[in-house]
Image (cartoon, rainbow, N blue to C red):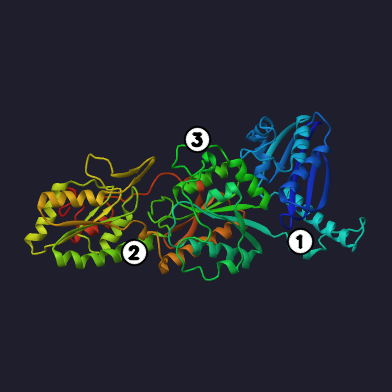
Amino acid sequence: MAADDYIIYTDGACSGNPGPGGWGAVIMHGSDLQEISGSADKTTNQRMELQAAVEALRMVPPGSNVRLHSDSAYLVNCFNQGWMNNWQRNGWQTSKKQPVENRDLWQQLLELSEKNKVEWVKVKGHSNDQLNDRCDQLAREAICSGEKLKSGDINSETEVGLQCPEIISRKTRRLGVLTGGGDCPGLNAVIRAVVKGATYNYDTDVVGFNNGFKGLVENDAALISDLAVSGILNRGGTILGTSNRDNPFDFRPGGSDYKNTGEDRSADALANLDQWGIEALVVIGGDGSLLLAHRFSELGVPILGIPKTIDNDLPATDVTFGFDSAVTTATEAIDKIHTTAESHHRVMVVEVMGRYAGWIALQAGMAGGGDIILIPELPFEYPVIIDKIMERRRRGKKFSIIVAAEGAHPAGEEPVYQEKGEIKRLGGIGDLVAGEIEKRTEMESRATVLGHLQRGGSPTSYDRVLATRFGVKAVELFQAGQYDQMVCLRGNQIESVPLAEAVKGTKRVDPDSEQVKAAIAVGTSFGCRLGENC
């Protein structure tokens, strides 16, 4: 270490936003180590983080080289990502055209950093870094000291130590949670598990952000109590609300389905996490939401992902919660359609969800006794479908059930989309197939689109249990300081994988899988020339 090199660790703490707060810093210069701290009566976590950095840099002579470590991703990224420069250009306004909070401290921090060569380093809160843990302790003790001084219980010369448990207990850890993307059965079960697991076992508060990443950007959030999650285990949907149209890195009024030019609002999201004192964020979502979560992890936010999608198309987990409930709903619908198909001697096409993966169609089709299953992984041919229907008629079976994934398509053609203005969504393959069959066979054919029925309703017992296990595992990872992970199911065990691995690619049905072969073995066709019965 050169004579002009300084290593600084800073941290802030707050027992409420606003509430009593404290800050602490450790300053190293050669073999010298200095600790400083302070408190405030009514403040926020963000202000205490800034105060710690300001007071620490004041102790450094101008012209020094400084490595300043903070567990506030927002503070570090304001300098490393150039947000500070944007504020100055915009007259100290945020991207929302609102005044920057704590401008006085930001300006002091800017002036002090310009007098030195400062390298801003993000560290994980409650990690194995002893100096960072010491800063956290100093900040908590400062809260205690400030409260005691205010009440007249001690004087400034009394050693405080950790003699203020009633104050320190109010400075519990905080975990954030949001649900992103499309809804599915089991989301409430996960929220319940996160809240109960954190509250009962680790004295950790949980802050819920409403409506997915939109709530994170707009600071639409609140503490979730144990009472708030009572009785929601069997409820579909999500008590937090969700959105699949709000990307913080390309945020647009009205959502991303519109033409308006988006703007990067990730700085606002980080500021809100910092304001709430969030140590880690649990993101419950599918591939899109987890990709956004991964981008925040690259900005220094400790992230824990929980895989949610009825499509079951995430490659890093054997099963996602919501899938079993969707398959159950689709199977029940196919069971009911069987009777009307047989009564009227019709061909009935049931269109199910799944996007570009055929998992729902495959399993619901097998469970519901579908005669033909059409999935994106096996492009179909109409002559093969017609041959199967006519072969059934020759055997005295005057009706047929076809289960079609929304992403299924004829060989050599693209999937079918429904376009409404700027919105382009999969859908319509059921009507297309039914129309072609009726035209080629003169058999009456009907299509039924199950649509969002598959997303709604009460989760199955399997999904309730899986969601609960996922939520508990996420809290355990948080307590262990193992971040940037996604929980997953491997065999019968709940494990975790790096988030970067979890968001790679899409898990699709393997045409050579045992499930496909089992379906073919009992006479099911996939509308293509695969195997003897296909």
Mark 3 = which residue? 261
Give me the disc on residue 329.
2
Q: Quadrant of the N terminus?
A: top right
User: Which x, y percent locates residue 516?
Assistant: 25, 55
Determine the residue located farthest toward the bottom in the rendered image: 231
Q: Is residue 289 left or right of residue 439?
A: right
Name the amino acid, label 3: Thr
Compared to 371, does 406 lie above or below? Answer: above
Residue carrying label 1: 168
Q: Amino acid at mark 2?
A: Thr
Task: Give the class, few, some or many, for how many residues have Cα within 10 Å of label 1's Cα (few <14, many ≥20).
Answer: some
Number of the front mark, 3 or 2:
3
The relative height of residue 491 versus residue 25 in the rendered view (above or below) is below
Task: Give percent across and percent down for residue 153.
Answer: 89, 64
Residue type, label 1: Ile
Q: Which of the two discs, 3 and 1, sits closer to the camera?
A: 3
Q: Secondary structure at mark 3?
A: loop
- Residue at the farthest left position: 394
Q: Return the residue nearer the eye: 338 or 251.
A: 251
Q: Position of residue 302 (x, y in %)?
A: 60, 49
| Image quadrant in which you'd find residue 114 | top right
Crowdedness of circle 2 by 10 Å Cα count: few (<14), some, many (20+)?
Answer: many
